[in-house]
Amino acid sequence: MKPLPFEKRHKDGSLWARGQTLDDGPTGYWEWFRKDGTKLRSGHFDKGEQVGEWTTYDSAGRVYKVTQMRRAEG
């Protein structure tokens, strides 16, 4: 199967999240936005699981924090 584009919007119509889904779960690169359009968070999913570096942005859109996600054991 091929990933499908996905977008979700805030109640006011502004973009809230953008990414791709595969088998109804998030996959690949995703990003979330505040109502004013600045980026809030971004990162990658693999089979619905957060992987790699996830970046959180401040209210001006500058990098605030980078978190390294670890795969779940099991």
Image: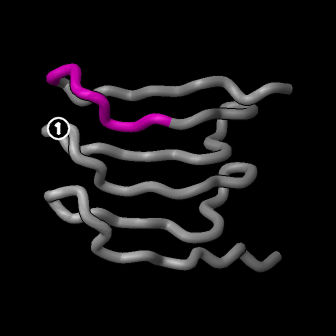
- Assign the N terminus to one quadrant of the image: top right
Q: Residue at x 17, y 38 (%)?
A: 35
Q: Which residues are magenta?
A: 12-18
- Give the labeled residue for mark 1: 35
**Could you tell whether 4 is left or right of 18 in the image?**
right
Give the residue at the far right of this rendering: 1
| Label 1 packing within 10 angstroms: few (<14), some (14-19), many (20+) | some
Image x and y of residue 69, in percent = 59, 75
- In magenta segment, residue 54: no
The three-letter code of the residue at mark 1 reads Lys
Q: Is residue 74 above or below residue 7?
A: below
- Assign the C terminus to one quadrant of the image: bottom right
Q: Is residue 31 above or below residue 10?
A: below
Q: Residue at x 51, y 46 (%)?
A: 30
Which is more toward the observer, 24 or 66? 66
Give the residue at the far top of this rendering: 13
Asked which secondary structure carries label 1, the reply is: loop
Residue 24, located in which quarter of the rendered image?
A: top right
